[in-house]
Image: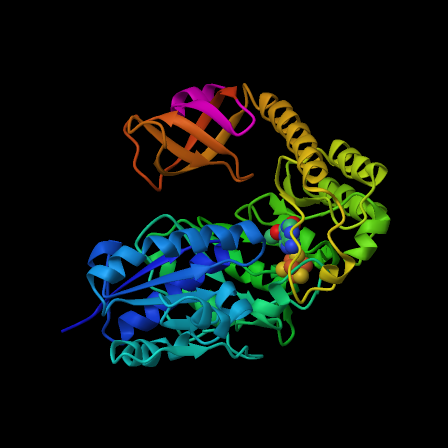
Amino acid sequence: MHRSIYIETYGCQMNFADTEIVNGILREQGYELASEVDSADAIFMNTCAIRDNAEQRIYGRLSNFEHLKKRNPHLVVGILGCMAERLRANLLENNSLVDIVCGPDEYRKLPALIDQAFEGEKGIRTQLSRVETYDDIVPLRTDGISAWLSVMRGCDKFCTYCVVPYTRGRERSRSLEGVVQEVGGLIERGFREVTLLGQNVNSYIDGENDFADLLIAVADVDPGLRVRFTTSHPQDMSDRLIEAIAGHENICSYIHLPFQSGSDRILELMNRTYTRDHYLNLVRKIRTAIPDVALSTDVIAGFPTETEEEHAETLSLMEEVRFDGAFMFKYSPREKTRAWKMGDDIPEDVKGRRLEEIIDLQRRISYDINKNWIGRTEHILLEGPSKRSEDEWMGRTGTNKTVIVPRGDFSVGDTIAVRINSATSATLFGTEITNAASEAA
Ligand code: 5AD
Ligand code: SF4
């Protein structure tokens, strides 16, 4: 009898891509993948440890499995991903529900761990690797339009607030040929868009080939394929990479470029390796080379010792750059990191207020930018029904903006020309332009 496994995924896109790798490994070993938690013989959570609230959410969900285990004492529960790596044996010791703890570089050991667990033996594997890239594993993806593909793992930047270097280990890259081959396979299966992933994707390196080479190689596989990538560190945003984006129609004009803080003193404390001026110059250079580029970012409110003036510098940088979008966070102290030792001196209510100010400002800017799109014609790739209604499709522009259109006669995977009619801070709304109309226009 084949046992069935259910995996829930939390956190960043790397985790979603990892779950597909885990599914690939498990399927190869003859396990079935359960579509519902209730019918599974083993339940896994692929977890995130980046901020405390991410972990609290996972503990909350874990406690939901208690009743399932009461009903079926043979049920196996496992923790994968960054929390497994961060908490290791503590997860087994402090939680009788957990049978397996397996870190991000040990997924090849999962079949053995699962077999043992079904024999009643708990197991833990959390060794980090300098070489594991799962290059030879075929991730198990459901057919679709858009695929995530991790091309490098780990992070060597050691930003002082960040737990990732400790949970995902050192940087290592997959082979360029391996990535190109996988992309070819995805195109044959009907995928129309790939997003190359890495915690620090633009520090990708395979022999002589850097990330610009990889991006070009992937874009050249098929000019009809949309190519995206995330996340980029400002330090590794080379001129060649900017040229590659500017010079290839099918590399999307969209860059996620975290700035984290607008204050030089805080950037230094964060070990970000650039100043406010460096960052602003980089943005100028990118905008000169790629005039239609959309930029998004990550920002942290309330880093240890951040003053009101320094917080105001974060706001002023946002006003200056005018990002299309942002992921905005309250600082959360993480054990093991260097910032952990700096204390957590900004009171919760001050952090909350600063974050609110950041969010309000970004919302205003996003709305202003999106309003300017009204009347424009854009090509969007249809990804599926909109959240609101089956009668509408959701698609995205090359610049990563979500556009809602009436369903019409289109199918998922079609690229259509759309006139933008209205906008909110998060979404554009449009109608399709028929060929005749767009030619006339
Ligand atoms: N507290 C708050 N935000 C954090 N990030 C990373 N670590 C922390 C932390 N300890 C944010 C950064 C990073 C994004 C993925 O998460 O902005 O770019
Ligand atoms: Fe964390 Fe910095 Fe690495 Fe990003 S670059 S994963 S924020 S250490």
Q: Is residue 428 magenta?
A: yes
Name the image quarter holding the N terminus: bottom left
Q: How is the image coloured?
A: rainbow
* Residue located at (51% from left, 55% from top): 55
* Between 166 and 149, the one nearer to me in the picture: 166
Q: Position of residue 78 (x, y in %)?
A: 37, 67
Left or right: 282 as drawn, with respect to 337: right
**Is residue 432 visible to the viewer in this orientation of the structure?**
no
Q: Position of residue 215 (x, y in %)?
A: 57, 59
Q: Residue furthest left?
A: 1
* Residue located at (52% from left, 52% from top): 54
- The answer to which image quadrant residue 186 occupies is bottom left
Left or right: 228 as drawn, with respect to 409: right
Q: Position of residue 381 (x, y in %)?
A: 42, 39
- Reply above or below: 119 against 209: below
- The answer to which image quadrant residue 123 occupies is bottom left
User: Magenta part of the protein: which range?
Assistant: 424-441
